[in-house]
Each structure stands twice: as C-alpha cells, then as structure tokens.
Amino acid sequence: MRVLKVLLPIAVCVALRLPAQEPPALAAAKAMDQEIENLSDLPDEARAQAIKDLVLRIRRQPKQYAVALAYNLAIAATEATERETLQDVTTTLADAIQKSPDKYRDDSQYTMLAKLARYSHMQVSLNDPQYAAEISKLQAEDERRSAVDFTLTDVHGQEWNLRSLRGKVVLVNFWATWCPPCRRELPDLGALYERFRDRGFAILAVTDEVVSKVKPLLSQQKVSYPVLLDPGHRVRDLFGINSIPQTLIYDREGRLVAQAIDRPLMRGFLDMLAQAGLR
C-alpha cells in the first residue's frame, strides 16, 4: 500500500458511519475489500482478471457497500490497467455514486471519478453538480500547475530548471525508492528516455529522499535520466502531489497537457506523450 494514497478499508468507509447491516452482507463486503487491497500483490495478468471479477461482484452489492467498494477498486485499478477494464471500473463507480443515497457518498468518490475522466480519458455519464464541480477544480489545478516552476539539483550535483527546458517535451515524475509501483515503472521510463531523448524529450524524476537512499537503486536499475532531490518535499508540495507515482507531461511551449493518476502501461505513457506532440 502506498503512503499518501490510502486504500480505505470498508470498516472505515462504511461500518463506522452506517446503520447496522445483516452480518453476512457486511462480512462479504469486508472480504471483497480485502481482495481489492491485495490486488497489487498479483501478477499483471491475474490482477486484470481479478479486477474484472470484482467489477461484476461490486455491481451486485447493496448500495451502501457498492459505492465504497467501487471507490476503493478505482484507486487500486489506476495502476497499469488496460483501458477497457479501467472503463468498466469507472462506469461501476459512476453508477454506484448515482444510485447510492447521499449519506453513503463523500467528496473523495467524486474526485476520483473526475480524475478518471480528465486524466485517464474515461467516459463518464453522470449528471451531478458535485461531479461537475470536481471537474472544474481539476481544471483550475491544472492551470496552476502549468505556471509552476522549480530548480532542483540532481544526484550528481547538477542543477535543473523546469522552465529552461522549454522547446522540449518534459516528463516530470514524482517517485520514491520505497514505492513499489514507482520501481516497476523505472524500466518504462528508461525505455522512453532512450527512444525519444534525441527528439527533444527530457525526464525530470523528483524524489524527496536523500541521495544515499536513491543512488543504490539508480545504479542497480541503470537509470540514465536526471533524478532530482527535493529535500523537505518543497516541490512536491508546490505541485500539490499527494500520491506517488505521479507523472506530468509538458509540451514544447511549457503547457501541462497530460497527467497520470498512477503507474500507466507503456501505451499510456505513449498516449500522454502524443498529447504533447511526441510520437
């Protein structure tokens, strides 16, 4: 489980603030939530099938449990999930929000749905003022991030400035050595860098860890792109990053054009770069 992105247990989401339910229904919901939390331990192929199975089962759950389970599944499924499956997860969350009474909903569910629509380009059919408000918030946040600049030093002591790279497509990646999805995406980022670096492409990987923690992994993984040190996570806070890994793509004019909620598949990285004009 990643720090900063907590997969909320059903006991917290539901049991502490809902009327008592029949024990079998609650037990089944708790068991499903545990399956969701364990998804990250599965190999990719088994994980994909497990997500599809959970989607079908969540749709049959009582309304008060379905919305919490659908939200938790959406969090878990944003890492390296095929678009068709992620669309099923998104539709399940939207349907659960629409059908669930107000007392079982919260802002985080709407925020997650808006992120899936805006950043993963999922189709969402939900005529709800709160959902529209969350989309507007994300748009405003993207505009703010487009104007952000920073200067950091990499693990070799060289300074890098985001705005000085205008004219290139820039991928900014927030990560850490202790984060399993972050480590799993290192080979894909390395492959992207080698493929596009001579075509005006740069990667700035940002971590708030100390250099002694970072260098051993970089040597083991043979990371060739710059890894910048963000002591006190000043830059991470400046961007409002509350979960990792997170990737942002800037086009050659310095405009923020794409983001990833979590670790995408290689095809997802390529789709984001295409939005910046790099194919």
Image: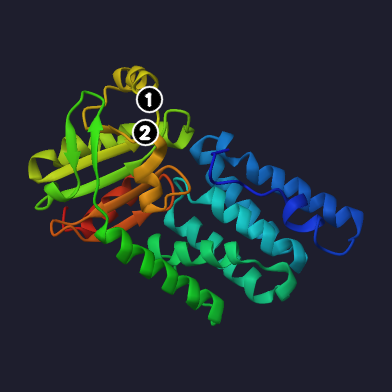
Q: Image height check: is 21 above or below 210?
A: below
Is 186 above or below relative to 64?
A: above
Q: Are marks 1 and 2 in contact (CB under 8 Å)?
A: yes
Q: Nearer the viewer, residue 257 or 143?
A: 143
Which comes before the other along the chain, label 1 or label 2? 1
Residue 265 appears anywhere in the view = no
Specify the amino acid type for callout 1. Val
Mark 1 surroundings: few (<14), some (14-19) or many (≥20) residues within 10 A: few
Q: Residue at x 13, y 47 (%)?
A: 165
Q: Residue at x 21, y 61 (%)?
A: 255
Residue 229 coordinates in the image, percent (x, y): 31, 32
Q: Which residue is mark 2?
A: 231
**Category of crowding for the residue at label 2, using alpha-carbon neighbours closer than 10 angstroms: few (below 14), some (14–19), many (at least 20):** some
Quarter location, residue 194: top left
Residue 198: give its label.
none
Tag 2: amino acid = Pro
Residue 184, image x, y percentages: 41, 33
Q: Position of residue 252 (x, y in %)?
A: 13, 56
- Describe the colour scheme in one phrase: rainbow
Q: Which residue is mark 1?
A: 210
Q: Is residue 260 visible?
A: yes
Helix, strand or loop at label 1? It is loop
Image quarter of the N terminus: top right
Q: Is residue 253 above or below residue 126?
A: above
Image quadrant assignment for residue 251: bottom left
- Locate residue 153 relative to residue 41 in the image: left or right: left
Placement of 104 over or under 173, stated as above or below? below
